[in-house]
């Protein structure tokens, strides 16, 4: 089953963990995005949602059957109602996935939720897709008077964030044992694809934290190197189904049809076989 993410205010976490994501008084649907290899794309709405006033947003991750009917489309265009699996395939094939959204017309039960995690608060676009390095519009139609930062927006351009240098990220990963620091570094490494040696990440395999291992598996998809395969195969043996799924999806992204041969007998693992099926690879 595909993994999906709904972004919400941190203060809702306890209630959601206990009773799920409920439909609101003025909201008859639940918005979400599919979790794909590109973390920016999966969580692209975070900064825009945070602009509405929430101080800290979290990701609520849940799983739904591939045949569940959902609505999908660009926020400014007509949406289609179709099975979730097909919606994700259509989404993955888009040349420009920014501004895309999905929603479902029912609550998400607590049993369908796999985890709730904190996210870096600077992921995604604001104001409109592709607005990076462009001045946000200060007109009343685009920017509410009295909203946070609105005065400065009208006075100057929005300052672009400066990416952390690759060597700095490597040093932080080597020196830190804090999970949050390591997660932030791994997310930052997903900003581009490399042919570099990922051996500096190998010691993270020994850290017993499923969330870290899952993000590590997705980060490795951005390293096209001979050592990447061995590290991903090690993650495919992890006890967590989410880690196995992430590692399998990374292998598929790197090796496509050859991923089945790379996995060998591991394709019989339920989590791995489902991930392969969701990736539209036939292995039977």
Image (spheres, helix red, strand yellow):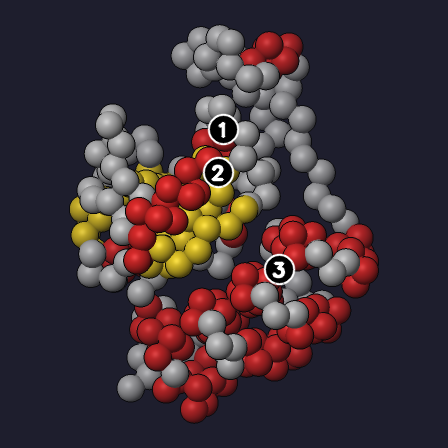
Q: Is residue 244 left or right of residue 207?
A: left
Q: Is residue 74 visible?
A: yes
Q: Residue at x 51, y 54 (%)?
A: 38
First in sequence: mark 1 vs mark 3:
1
Q: Residue at x 31, y 79 (%)?
A: 282
As displayed, is residue 61 above or below residue 200?
A: above
Q: CA distance from mark 1 to mark 3?
A: 32 Å
Q: Is residue 189 visible?
A: no
Q: Which mark is residue 54?
A: 1
Provide residue 200's location: percent of width, then percent of height: 75, 69
Q: Residue at x 46, y 46 (%)?
A: 59
Report if the CB atoms under discs 2 and 1 are less than 8 Å apart: yes
Q: Which mark is residue 10?
A: 2
Dot 1: element: loop
First in sequence: mark 2 vs mark 1:
2
Provide residue 254's location: percent of width, then percent of height: 52, 71
Q: CA distance from mark 3 to mark 2?
A: 31 Å
Categorize mark 1 by other alpha carbons within 10 Å: few (<14), some (14-19), many (20+): few
Categorize mark 3 by other alpha carbons within 10 Å: few (<14), some (14-19), many (20+): few
Q: CA distance from mark 2 to mark 1?
A: 8 Å
Dot 3: element: loop
Provide residue 161's location: percent of width, then percent of height: 67, 35
Q: Which mark is residue 193?
A: 3
């Amino acid at each position: 089953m595909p993994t999906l993410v709904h972004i919400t205010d941190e203060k809702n976490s306890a209630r959601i963990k206990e009773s799920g994501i409920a439909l609101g008084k003025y909201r008859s649907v639940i918005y979400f995005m599919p979790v794909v290899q590109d973390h920016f794309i999966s969580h692209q709405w975070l900064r825009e949602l945070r602009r509405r006033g929430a101080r800290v947003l979290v990701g609520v991750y849940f799983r739904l059957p591939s045949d569940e009917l959902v609505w999908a489309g660009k926020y400014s265009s007509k949406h289609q109602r179709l099975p979730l699996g097909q919606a994700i395939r259509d989404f993955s094939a888009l040349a420009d996935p920014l501004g895309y959204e999905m929603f479902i017309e029912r609550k998400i039960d607590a049993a369908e939720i796999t985890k709730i995690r904190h996210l870096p608060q600077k992921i995604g676009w604001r104001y409109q897709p592709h607005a990076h390095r462009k001045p946000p519009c200060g007109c009343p139609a685009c920017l509410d008077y009295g909203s946070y930062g609105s005065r400065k927006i009208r006075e100057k351009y929005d300052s672009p964030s400066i990416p952390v240098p690759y060597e700095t990220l490597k040093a932080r990963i080597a020196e830190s044992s804090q999970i949050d620091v390591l997660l932030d570094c791994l997310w930052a490494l997903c900003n581009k694809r490399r042919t570099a040696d990922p051996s500096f990440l190998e010691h993270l395999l020994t850290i017993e934290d499923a969330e870290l291992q899952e993000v590590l598996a997705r980060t490795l998809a951005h390293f096209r190197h001979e050592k990447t395969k061995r590290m991903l195969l090690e993650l495919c043996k992890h006890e967590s189904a989410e880690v196995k799924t992430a590692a399998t999806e990374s292998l598929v992204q790197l090796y496509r049809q050859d991923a089945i041969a790379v996995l060998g007998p591991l394709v019989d693992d339920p989590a791995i076989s489902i991930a392969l099926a969701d990736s539209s690879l036939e292995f039977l």
